[in-house]
Amino acid sequence: MNRRRLPSALAAAALAVAAAGWALSAPAGLDPAIAEAVAQPGDAAAGRIVFYAGGCESCHMSPGLSDPLRLGGGQPLATPFGVFYPPNISPDPQSGIGAWSARDFAAALLDGVSPAGAHYYPVFPYTSYRLTRPQDVRDLFAFLKTLPAVQGRAPGIALGFPFNIRRALGIWKRLYAVDPPDWDATGPSDSWRLGRYLVEGPGHCVECHSPRNPLGGIAASARFQGGPLPDGKGKAPALTPVALKDWSKDDIAEALSSGVTPTGDSLGGAMAAVVRNTAQLPPSYRAAIAEYLKTPR
Amino acid sequence: MKPIVTFGMLIALCVSAAYADQDPIAARKALMKSNGAATKTLVGILKGAPFDLAAVQSALKVYVDSAAAAPALFPDSSKTGDTHALPAIWDNKADFEARFKKFGADASAALAAITDEASFKANAPGILKNCGSCHETYRAPLN
């Protein structure tokens, strides 16, 4: 090519790449069918179970409290990418999500997009939460609206370059946010299907129990292979049938109820917060989780 | 639970008490192991093993004795070494020791209250909640 034409050719190429990047990183619009489904009146009692299946209070509870229903956010979550502060998700209209519509809530939980159309960081595990059924999203929203309003916004986050380029998460999502499978299509039993939904969806177990690549994504082959905890202190063990060979289904269900392990030890550590949530689920849910984890997949 | 196992647990507890001065870390590990054995017994019955009042009482007695012996096994000199005890213990000594007191009190109350399977099922789960309360903040991850 003629040397004098090179700069403008390069500029055009750069512009094309930037335009493509901009287009690829655009937030997805919420599926209209889902938007319609979540806008129907929700069942708060059913939503309470979704709340505990999803473990919302473990991150969003106001720090220093023991009331899991005060969701003022602000508890710092240290990760290799920086410190995050889960937001206030109480029904307070200024500090929390009191002014949100069901559609806003669904877009946040399922697509990781804020009502203003900005991407959320995947420290909010929408990579798992996006598998939540629309009726569960609807019921959870109804439940959250019954909780006490907590005033005070959580601190804003300040990440280093390049993680502070929020728009780039649109591309990250294309790589690492999977679409839900057809939940009812396959599986050996109802309990297994329920367990798969709870584990892969609201339970978001994979988010801690897997290693992450340098981009913070979880490769498909790495799922449930165990990994470092987000704050770097300690490891979440693998949850494959092989790794769980010394645990029976009853052992797993018991641990999710009382925290007690087959050797009479206590799960403790980061799992104590998880057990506080799974202990609130119906026993059939814990049994379903155990069923799914113990079945080769 | 076989008497030999109870006997073994109590021996472990006595041995750990004897070695407390020399090696509090080893002593408290032995103490926690005996707690674990007691917990296995109680959870086993909760999950359907035949109810055995003597076994339940032995297990609860282990809890009571552990709770009484444990605070002395965390002297300032034992912060480092082959231990999973977190520095938070010594930063919050009062809270840490209060939890052992509560654990012992809960176990004593259960010893008095449990006379049959029904009272066992009603009282046992509450005692087990004590384990997680310390192990969440005062023990390092095991892996």
Image (cartoon, rainbow, N blue to C red):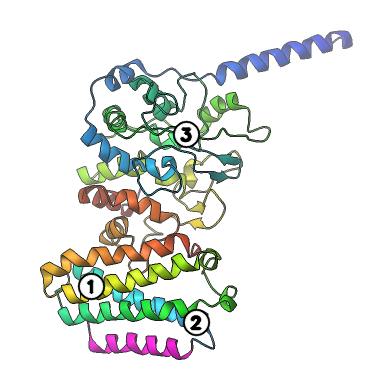
Residue A64 visible to an observer of this rendering: yes
Q: Secondary structure at mark 3?
A: loop
A261 or B54, nearer to the observer? B54
The three-letter code of the residue at mark 1 reads: Ala
Residue A115, given in percent of the width and then of the height, sits at 45, 20
State the residue position of label 2. Answer: B26
State the residue position of label 1. Answer: B109
Cα separation between marks 1 and 2: 29 Å
The three-letter code of the residue at mark 3 reads: Pro
Residue B20, given in percent of the width and then of the height, sits at 49, 86
Residue B20, compared with residue A228, is above or below; it is below
Residue A239 visible to an observer of this rendering: no
Span of residues in magenta: B1-19
Instruction: Please give the chain letter of the residue carrying mark 3.
Output: A
Residue B65, given in percent of the width and then of the height, sits at 34, 81
Answer whether residue B10 is magenta in the image.
yes
Residue A87 — which label? 3
Mark 1 or 3, closer to the camera: 1
Residue that appears at 33% across and 22% down: A102
User: Which quadrant of the figure has residue A103?
Assistant: top left
User: Which quadrant of the figure has residue A143?
Assistant: top left
Mark 3 or 2, closer to the camera: 3
